Image: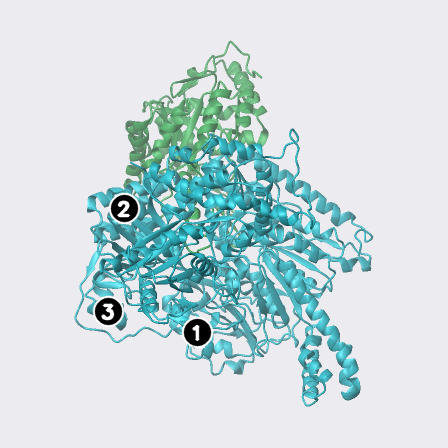
Amino acid sequence: MNPVSHTQLDLSTRYLGLELPHPLVASASPLSYTLAGIRQLEDAGIAAIVMHSLFEEQIEHESRTLDHFLDYGTYSFAEALDYFPEPQQFNVGPEEYLNLVSNAKKATNLPIIGSLNGVSPGGWTRYARYIEEAGADALELNLYYLPTDLTMTGSDIEQMYLGVIRDVKEVISIPLAVKIGPYFTALPHTATRFVHAGADALVLFNRFNQPDFDLETLEVTPRLVLSRSDELRLPLTWTAILYGRTRADLAITSGIHTHLDVLKATMAGANITMMASELLQHGLGRIHTMLNDLTAWMEGYGYDSIKTMRGSMSQQNISNPDAFERANYMKMLQSWRTDPTGTLSKG
Amino acid sequence: MYQQDTLDGNEAVARIAHKLNEVIAIYPITPSSPMGEHADMWSAAGTPNLWGTVPLVQEMQSEGGAAGAVHGALQTGALTTTFTASQGLLLMIPNMYKIAGELTSTVFHIAARSLAAQGLSIFGDHSDVMATRGAGWAMLFAASVQEAHDFALIAQAATLMSRVPFLHIMDGFRTSHEVNKISLLPDDDLRTLIDDDRVRAHRARALTPDRPVMRGTAQNPDIYFQARETVNPYYQETPAIVTKLFKKFATQTGRHYQLFDYVGASDAERVIVLMGSGAETAEETVRYLTDYGEKVGVLKVRLYRPFDSATFIKCLPQTVTRIAVLDRTKEPGSAGEPLYQDVVTAVSESDWQTKPVIIGGRYGLSSKEFTPAMVIALFEELIKARPKNHFTLGIDDDLSFTSLPFDSSLTIEPATTRRAIFWGLGSDGTVSANKNSIKIIGDTSQYAQGYFVYDSKKSGARTVSHLRFGPEPIRSSYLIQQADFIAVHQFGFLDRFDVLKAAMPGATLLLNSPYPADAVWDHLTLEVQQTIHDKTLKVYSINAYELASTLGLGNRINTIMQTAFFLLTDILPPEEAIASIKATIEKTYGKRGEAILRINYAAVDATLEQLREVVIPEYLGDRTRPPVVSPDAPEFVHHVTARMMADQGDMLPVSQLPHDGTYPTATTQWEKRAIAQEVPLWNPEVCIQCGKCILVCPHAVIRAKLADPAAFDEAPEGFQHATARWQGLSDKHYTLQVSMDDCTGCSLCVEACPAKDKRQVGRKAINMTPYLPLCNANRPHWDFFLKLDDQPKHDGIPLTTVKNIQLLRPLFEFSGACAGCGETPYLKLLSQLYGDRSIIANATGCSSIYGGNLPTTPWAKDATGRGPAWSNSLFEDNAEFGLGMRLTLDKQREYALELLQALAGELEPVLVENLLNADQSSEAGVSAQRERGSQLKAALTPMTNAKARDLLSLADTLVKKTIWIVGGDGWAYDIGYGGLDHVLTSGKDINILVLDTEVYSNTGGQASKATSLGAVAKFAMGGKATPKKDLGRIAMQYGDVYVAQIAMGASDTQTLKAFLEAESYSGPSLIIAYSHCIAHGIDMAKGLTQQKLAADSAYWPLYRFDPRLKAQQKNPFQLDSKPPKIPFKDYALNETRFRMLRQTNPKGADLLFKNAQEVIDTRWQSYEHLAQNLQPEEGRA
């Protein structure tokens, strides 16, 4: 299926050196867990796919778990010196993942962006090279660390991130995107350092794991909440601030649900927009619909290409750059008032 | 130059057997199982045999089945073998007669092991192979790992040439499990010895419709005898064939063997004759003695059958005047043991003018140590004018006075050999580290030997590793008696065992100590300190547990202690040792992932920094080694059991042991092992008194009682109790106590606890807490708790809820089962409900080991002295064994009732009437009948007529007794299935409990027919490709069998119902109990969760089939599980047995998992159908 036939409009964009027909990219989701899913995404017209992440902990965990249980209970009792046959070879590493990358490249014409998730320097970073060798066109490094240690400083964490970026960059020759969270004290500065360390693109933003409480079982439970359009504003803000001030490409990955979200992201400065929740909730047909809506909007408003609008509403390109700064914050607060009953409402 | 390697006897044999066969039929049995496992692994990896094709390996359902398959494969022309031992070999005897009678070339490789007689033993002697002497097989005995490797080839070559089948025998454990450096036979040597024309001749004799013949005819008196004599020439030729092959082998390899190898003085006057590993010790001793000019020698028997008398005589020095023949077997009632009789016959038939005096005796049964001191004692005996015949060697026989005395302190360890002993825990990796050390040293120019002694327990098990190294091949086939290095990897062992007994003066002692080096001395007992002083030991310490924990190695201290060993000895230069250790780590752990490599490397480096010398002060402390058992222990426990517990069982004289294998029960209570690092601690404020922790506790260390508040007045300080949360019993107090010294720290209880602390939800009503700060206070609490009255079964609360059952005293306690065992909670429940009137027939397997392995056993007694009576017959016959018990009880009860009626006129009529018509369907009814039984016995005691005396002896049979037939899936699904099936159709009141772990757990996780489709197990390396047998469904087909499939972790209520219904059903009952197991590769604390997931996925649907419901016009089949909530994968991938396949063969795993899900779906639909549609008329009952 080819959802877009509006040849007069140029929806193409460039990200990590990849020429993409349009800015809609699939972010990591169950949709790309299997080759069949990846094929369906291609058929539905997606421009590229970011694979689900291979986690540092996953690599270590597989290895440690296997080691633990192969040894557990061994050489304790004369009749049962061990409990498992030990094959010549184990695939404790990311072979399954690498096979999927490799097969996806063979089976589709899509750009495939591999993804690694980890924070600590170590041998696991060599899997970046394996992902490249498996055929990935680019790599997204997902930096995600929840500091619960009271002695760890922001600087410690940033240094850790920088180390990982350098390590990964050193072992690959494909472009590297770095996916970060929004909670840096000085995000533009930190982002710039990441770019200097080797990031060819910045992906905004990671969504933090925020577990829920189950009041029946009194357990803290993981709960994945799909994104909503209003989550776009956080990456939108920072993309708009960063655009034009970094050599890295920019991607937005939260809150992309409609063609309007794509337009806003692009105008803020994003090279591409990534989505998963929308596709999971409403099906792959949304790619076609959004592209048509996007085209119609561009036609309606007289835009001839995505590139034209990219960064058009970034901080450096708007007339009132302080809209992104404290003055805007103050203005927003002042726009609310309290009525005599104490109810807060928009004035 | 031959390639050398360090490996154990099993691997040494399996390498050759796999090379020289096309079909291998196997069944696991200790100590031969690893041979089959190696063969299976190599075939799975595509390793070809000598002719370039990969042998087919087939696991069978029993050794009888394996022998049958071998017979069939041989008849159709394949080179075929098997590996077995002990009872397994006995099951092969019928086929062995056939195979020999048909002159079929084959070799069975045997790790010779004791036979079960007064007790089972897994250890080595020649009882098994000697029991097959009549079958007509040649018997070739290997004495060492090298010989086992060599003789595997020679036996194969010889059987092809002679057509006489061969048993190739090595000593179980001593050779099969000894690691030694040997020269490996390359394929060229195999080709030189194996004549391909003979292989083709073997093939040409095969049955084929292209050239049809028949074998296995029925023969009559006219020709059977003559036909039996046709084989004689083949046997007569065999010794010459073997001799020829020995010569050819020597030419090829330089290693010389003869039918009978003589070592010693050429003018020897005294000669010992023996075979097997003991011959190595005898040779070492003879060489030692002849160096001193003693005229002694040893004749090592290689080919025992056919026994070549003429060659035997020729091999003896003509100067010999005294011969001692040593048999590693016992043939009660014989004129002498087998080898002795053969030697006597050979000498008697010889033309010697002056025949030597011959004595014979037994040694080394069940791997009993055979040492140079014993050999010397025997030579000294031979000097005597009238040496003792029919002697025993190595024990103190103060009953029949057969034993020869020996000086146990005498040693002849060669000065060039370095010797090290390591005391460790099974779980700390000591043995695997030592196996690696042997490999490291074996890779140098030095020779190395390792032998490992294991505990009788499966949890907290102790291991003792004996390692020798030196410039010459090591022949010492006995435990180290003088060590220059001793490592104690568990500090607590210093208090419990005489770990320094074998320390030489000036030896090095390495301690894994929780205390810093300068505090170690003050934590040693006076005995240890004194020995260190007396022997001037050099002591070093490292806190290996702390270091391992810091590095993320958990309790695996192997790499740390191995590094320390190499640093403290000069076996290798330190740099070379470190490099070798790291290379071994790479080899051992490399394929498990980089993270594992990294932390092990870190462990090596950290050990270099943290190993410290302990400065030995001059003063001594006053803390002495604590007593082995409490002063309250009964006499037998004090005099016998305690000595076994203290590692002094070898010194127990014959007279102190029961003559018929009858031992007291309830002895684990005296063995306080204190193996848990953390133990559960009760919080009465949070507790809802549900009893779930008690129900699931595998070792019965958590218990509860109700008592009047006043009963706690004398309670020791800190003893906790709370108002009882029982309807109608709020005037009582409830207490829950933990026997911390018996706990294994598995934490299943915490997982099962549903009550959370509202102020701190991470805390429950029971929480794991460090053991050391609690243990001293806990002991008086536990003692006080035991003194509180037990809940009577017949009085008061109904026994239909888990909450109430928790109050019943378990009569199965503190077993040696694995921490977190999934089987024992079921047995404990059984014991709580019916222990006071149960007889248990226990199939061989895990449950017979943790249930019946000495020194202490867990089946216990209640306050009246009643409790389960327990026995283990065999692996294969348990259902029949239990049925036999039922038949006796039924017959005796019938006879007792007949006698009662006959004596009615002489007894109180009401008593007789009530005894005859007693309703014993409830505990109250059973209790009342017991009371009547007591009255009857009182009335009968003064009566003297025969009937009265008979009735007195049978009066107890009038009280209801319950037979429980217990075993694992290996028994129920495989080896014992035929018997089980028959017993299910008997209509008799028996109860069968199958503890289904889905593998042969006791022998190390081999696949059974209970193994799940897709699970990886030994003999199913590629994942089991066929579905688990639906045993319950098969049993239900009969219609009159009560069947339940249960999983305590999924529903404890359903589990309890199943036990109550099964026991109350007057016909056969079958309970199939999901038992999570260490062989599943799970965190055992999550065993109950896995049980629940198994049920939630419908992999293990819970159901009950009660034939009694038909009479009520109800569907007898009740499906207790709800429709599947999760896919199979969500359950399975939590377990290594399933996950492993994804790590070795992801595509294969996907396919098998898909198939497994389909089977589950189909079975679920079928069960749903049964639950909805089964009509009462279906089934025959």
Report the Cα–Cα distance between label 3 and label 1: 26 Å
Relative image position of residue A233 (x, y in whole percent): 44, 32
Q: Residue furthest top?
A: A8
Relative image position of residue A45 (x, y in whole percent): 53, 20
Disc 3: CA contacts within 10 A as few (<14), some (14-19) or many (>=20): some
Looking at numbered disc 1 in the image, what kind of residue is underneath it? Val
Q: Quadrant of the N terminus of chain A?
A: top right
Which chain is indicated by disc 2? B
Relative image position of residue B423 (x, y in whole percent): 33, 59
Looking at numbered disc 2 in the image, what kind of residue is underneath it? Ile
Residue receiving disc 3: B531
Residue B441 — which label? 2
On the rendered structure, is A7 left or right of B651? right
Relative image position of residue B374 (x, y in whole percent): 34, 64
Disc 1: CA contacts within 10 A as few (<14), some (14-19) or many (>=20): some
The reply to whether residue B755 is visible in this rendering is no
| The hue in which chain A appears in the rendered picture of the protein | green
Disc 2: CA contacts within 10 A as few (<14), some (14-19) or many (>=20): many
Report the Cα–Cα distance between label 2 and label 1: 41 Å
The reply to whether residue B74 is visible in this rendering is yes
Sooner in the amino-acid sequence: mark 3 or mark 1: 3
Give the chain coloured cyan: B
On the rendered structure, is B456 left or right of B823? left
Quadrant in which residue A183 is drawn: top left
Residue receiving disc 1: B640
- Which mark lies nearer to you, 3 or 2? 2
Secondary structure at numbered mark 3: helix
Sooner in the amino-acid sequence: mark 3 or mark 2: 2
Which chain is indicated by disc 1? B
The structure's colour scheme is: by chain
- Kindly check if marks 3 and 1 are in contact, taking CB atoms under 8 A apart as contact: no
